[in-house]
Structure formats: C-alpha cells, structure tokens
Image (cartoon, grey):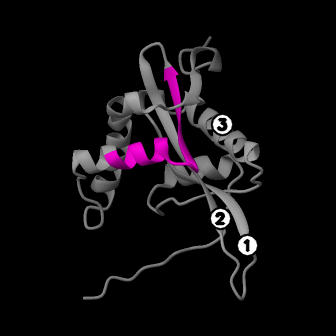
Amino acid sequence: MNEEALSEAFVAFRIATTEEMEGLRALVDELDLFHRNAIPDIFQKPDQHERTDSIRMLIEGPASDIIVAETDAGPIGLAAVIHKSLARTAVRTAREIVEIDMLVVAFPYRGRGVGKGLLARAERWARDRGVTACELGVWELNVAAIDFYESAGFSTAIRRMSKVLV
C-alpha cells in the first residue's frame, strides 16, 4: 500500500462515548485553533470545561452523536451529527435534516480518505433515521474544506453574508 493512502482496513469508525471526551477534545481543539487563527475577531479560545460540556451534549443528546475515526494509535478524526426537525413556515415546508456540525481529521491523516469515511458514516447515520438530506456550514475562507465537501457531492444551497459596520 502507498504510504500516502490510508486503507479503511486500518481505520475503524464508531460512535463516541462519554468516557473518551478528553481524547476527543484534542481533535476539537485542532478545529477550534484553525478557526481562531483564520478569523480571530469572531472566534475565541473556549473555556475547556465549556468545550467538554458541548462535546458531552453531542454524545449524550437524544438526536446527536459523534462519529469517531480511529487507528490503533487512537482517534484521528470525528464528525458531529445532529438530527434536526425544521418546522413548516408560511413559505417553507417542514423538513428533516442531519446537520454535520463539525468534521475534523488530525493533520497528519488528511488527504487519506478518513474524511470521506466520516462523511459516509454521517450519511448512513442520517439514512438510519429516515432522513434524506445532510447539511453543513463552512466558512468561505476554508477553501480546502469547500473543495472537499463539493467533491463529496455537497453544493451551496444558501449563502450567508456579513458586513462589519464601523
């Protein structure tokens, strides 16, 4: 096998448990650091207890899970998935979606199929709940993530724009 390729045979995918929250926080910290460095006027370093609580809520939530990718060395990636019911409005039908709230692969394992595996498991998680659509948000400056999601079949459905007022 090519060293650059990481076969799924060496990566296991499973649902996270509360016992491993501290280990998963290292992956979430990597994602948080990327956002803080990229957009420091919006993102701040989270209080570690608050961040651990947010991870716990995703793991223990009745409509959410964290899917973990791991090797013998431990967790190398994760995807948080949340089943959401969007209410009908005057102009929009009611919908069921699964939001991929965050997806992160540890830097040394990027480009080796781990993210694709996590997305496939997120889609399976949605289908298992009878949901036929996955949605996610990605910052415009994260071109690599946009390219990755587009290569996986995602397309822009809505664009949120902002303007700093001075």
The amino acid type found where label 3 is placed reads Arg
The answer to whether residue 33 shows anywhere in this view is no
Mark 1 neighbour density, 10 Å: few (under 14) some (14–19) many (20 or more): few
Earlier-in-chain disc, 2 versus 1? 2
Q: Residue 99's quadrant in the figure?
A: bottom right
Earlier-in-chain disc, 3 versus 1? 1
Mark 2 neighbour density, 10 Å: few (under 14) some (14–19) many (20 or more): few
Residue occupying image coordinates x 70% and y 44%: 123
Earlier-in-chain disc, 2 versus 3? 2
Task: Give x and y (percent) for residue 89.
Answer: 68, 83
For the record, the magenta segment spans 53-70
The amino acid type found where label 2 is placed reads Ser
Mark 3 neighbour density, 10 Å: few (under 14) some (14–19) many (20 or more): many
Asked if the magenta segment contains residue 60, the reply would be yes
Pointer 2: what residue? 85
**How far apart in space, not on screen, are marks 3 and 1 (Cα)?**
25 Å
Pointer 1: what residue? 94
Report helix, strand or loop for mark 1: loop
**How far apart in space, not on screen, are marks 2 and 3 (Cα)?**
20 Å
The answer to whether residue 111 shows anywhere in this view is yes
**How far apart in space, not on screen, are marks 2 and 1 (Cα)?**
7 Å
Asked if the magenta segment contains residue 65, the reply would be yes
Pointer 3: what residue? 121
- Are the residues flagged by discs 2 and 1 in contact, CB closer than 8 Å? yes
